[in-house]
Image: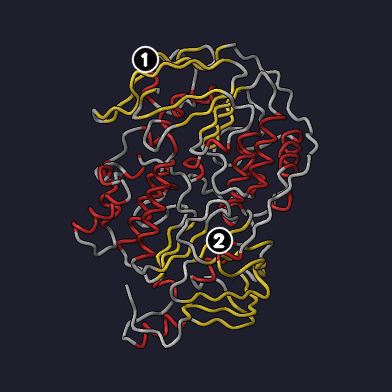
């Protein structure tokens, strides 16, 4: 991993650069940033501030039309005899979405993660780790153990939870021995123990000489970070040592709540009733004897570590899991298997999850992506003028009206998450199922979302809110369901 000695401590430098996308759109003007040996950088900033675009600059995916860029690290490696055509060849990037020759979510449908899949599509986690790497069995086992995922190696990759998938990508990146490891939101989707474990691993990597560049929220910067680059509206607002950084807390002004939707759907008092529900895969228990009742107007936090069964529980509630038919699962007053289709259930639910995000691959604009929430599909369907007005009002409320006509797949991860959160809200349903809805959102957007949940959802609507961070909970979410190893604790 260590190159020959650099004649300068500078690894990368860009000065007063104007950078454009391949389409000609300007991304940055006057961009300057220098990374030196021994520095560990965190890139921070709000949603849409340019964090993902800056990583594309490091990877050589953007065009510089003025200013200077230098890569002394690349020059040093070439001088040592290594063939390097692009800086991206020395950077190990852990991106948000797994799309590769090995695995593509676009080749699968969402409910498939809860069913058996064809053998030729059944990429295991172990196969995923081994492909394209030269690591030995011992090294693979050591890294998987350090990340707490060794026992998951025989499982299908598609079956992994969001947090488990994140650890898998970090492990795979480490196995390629990159000169610079670029991690985009490495702690997102991990529970408290998982965040502590990964933070410890990052600390160990830095202590061992690894060069890290992280994209993280400004309020969750790992202690191994020595330098910060803050972006505001695609301009550098701070660049320097961590101790000199003084983030300003966002001030969320009161926002006028514009009513939308009539909220007059007929809903029974008992929304969800589970009795002694058990789910297992290949003999391995996932949920064990779960009994739980949710009534109209209740607002629940669903808590528990990664792998505790939260995602499986939600899949039963949202009509996606086939094992609902062999259990006592009543939704909106009807037993599953009593003639009500999955789509009839989904009509009454506004759903968001990080895993669902991965299946959006259609070439839609942001507003048309949000509008798919009316029909509960992942492709565009015709909408009424009233529905279009609802989408516009929500984009205005979340202060992203300028994104409406933009291509969804070209938005940053944070911007995509806002659009999909809006998608969960558009039909104003009797039940909201929000699985880690605040991942990668900035502080202002989180506050607007909490305010929406607390003030715009009526007393007759029900909320299930999954999080690893209790501080994220809206104030009206007052009930708790905690899972651990598939059991209610």
Colour basis: secondary structure
Residue 245 seen by the camera: yes
- Seen in the picture, residue 260 relative to 184 is either above or below; the reply is above
Q: Which residue has dot 1 on it?
A: 276
In this rendering, the count of numbered labels is 2
Residue shown at 48% from the left, 81% from the top: 10
Which quarter of the figure is the C terminus placed in? Answer: top left
Residue 351 place in picture, x, y as percent: 55, 33
**Circle 2 residues within 10 Å: few <14, some 14–19, many ≥20:** some
- Seen in the picture, residue 67 relative to 110 is either above or below; the reply is below
- Seen in the picture, residue 249 relative to 338 is either above or below; the reply is below
As drawn, the label of residue 52 is 2
In this view, which residue lies farthest toward the front? 243
- Mark 1 falls on what kind of element? strand
Could you say which quadrant of the image residue 305 lies in? top left
How far apart are the two marked residues, 2 and 1, measured between alpha carbons? 45 Å
Q: Tell whether label 1 touches label 2 (CB within 8 Å).
A: no
- Seen in the picture, residue 111 relative to 417 is either above or below; the reply is above
Residue shown at 78% from the left, 40% from the top: 254
Residue 377 place in picture, x, y as percent: 55, 36
């Amino acid at each position: 991993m260590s190159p020959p000695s650099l004649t300068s401590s500078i690894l990368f430098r860009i000065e007063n650069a104007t950078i454009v996308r391949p389409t000609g759109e300007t991304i940055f003007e006057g961009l300057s940033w220098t990374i030196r040996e021994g520095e560990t950088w965190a890139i921070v900033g709000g949603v849409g501030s340019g964090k993902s675009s800056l990583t594309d600059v490091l990877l050589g995916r953007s065009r510089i039309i003025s200013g200077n860029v230098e890569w002394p690290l690349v020059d040093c490696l070439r001088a040592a005899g290594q063939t390097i055509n692009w800086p991206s060849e020395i950077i190990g990037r852990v991106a948000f979405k797994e799309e590769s020759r090995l695995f593509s979510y676009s080749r699968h449908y969402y409910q498939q993660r809860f069913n058996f899949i064809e053998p030729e599509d059944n990429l295991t986690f172990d196969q995923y780790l081994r492909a394209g790497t030269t690591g030995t069995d011992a090294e693979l086992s050591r890294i998987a153990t350090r990340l707490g995922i060794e026992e998951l190696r025989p499982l299908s990759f598609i079956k992994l939870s969001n947090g488990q998938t994140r650890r898998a990508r970090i492990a795979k990146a480490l196995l390629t021995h990159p000169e610079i490891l670029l991690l985009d939101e490495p702690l997102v989707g991990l529970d408290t123990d998982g965040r502590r474990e990964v933070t410890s691993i990052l600390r160990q990597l830095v202590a061992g000489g690894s060069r890290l560049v992280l994209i993280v929220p400004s309020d969750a910067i790992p202690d191994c970070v020595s330098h910060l680059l803050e972006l505001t509206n695609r301009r550098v607002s701070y660049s320097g040592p961590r101790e000199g950084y003084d983030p300003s807390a966002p001030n969320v002004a009161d926002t006028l709540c514009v009513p939308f939707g009539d909220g007059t759907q007929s809903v029974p008092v008992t929304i969800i009733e589970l009795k002694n529900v058990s789910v297992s895969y290949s003999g391995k228990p996932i949920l064990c004897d779960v009994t739980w009742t949710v009534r109209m107007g209740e607002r629940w936090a669903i808590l528990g570590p990664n792998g505790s069964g939260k995602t499986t529980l939600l899949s039963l509630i949202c009509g996606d899991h086939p094992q609902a038919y062999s259990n006592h699962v009543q939704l909106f007053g009807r037993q599953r298997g009593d003639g009500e289709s999955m789509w009839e259930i989904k009509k009454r639910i506004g759903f968001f999850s990080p895993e669902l995000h991965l299946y959006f691959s259609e070439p839609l604009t942001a507003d048309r992506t949000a509008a798919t929430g009316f029909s509960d599909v992942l492709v565009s369907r015709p909408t009424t003028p009233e529905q279009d007005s609802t989408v516009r009002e929500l984009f205005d409320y979340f202060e992203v009206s300028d994104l409406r006509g933009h291509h969804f797949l070209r938005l940053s991860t944070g911007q995509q998450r806002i659009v999909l959160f809006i998608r969960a809200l558009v039909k104003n349903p009797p039940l909201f199922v929000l699985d880690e809805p605040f991942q990668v959102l900035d502080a202002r957007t989180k506050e607007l979302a909490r305010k929406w949940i607390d003030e715009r959802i009526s007393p007759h609507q029900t909320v299930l809110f999954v999080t690893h961070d209790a501080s994220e909970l809206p104030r009206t979410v007052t009930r708790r369901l905690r899972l651990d190893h598939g059991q209610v604790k």
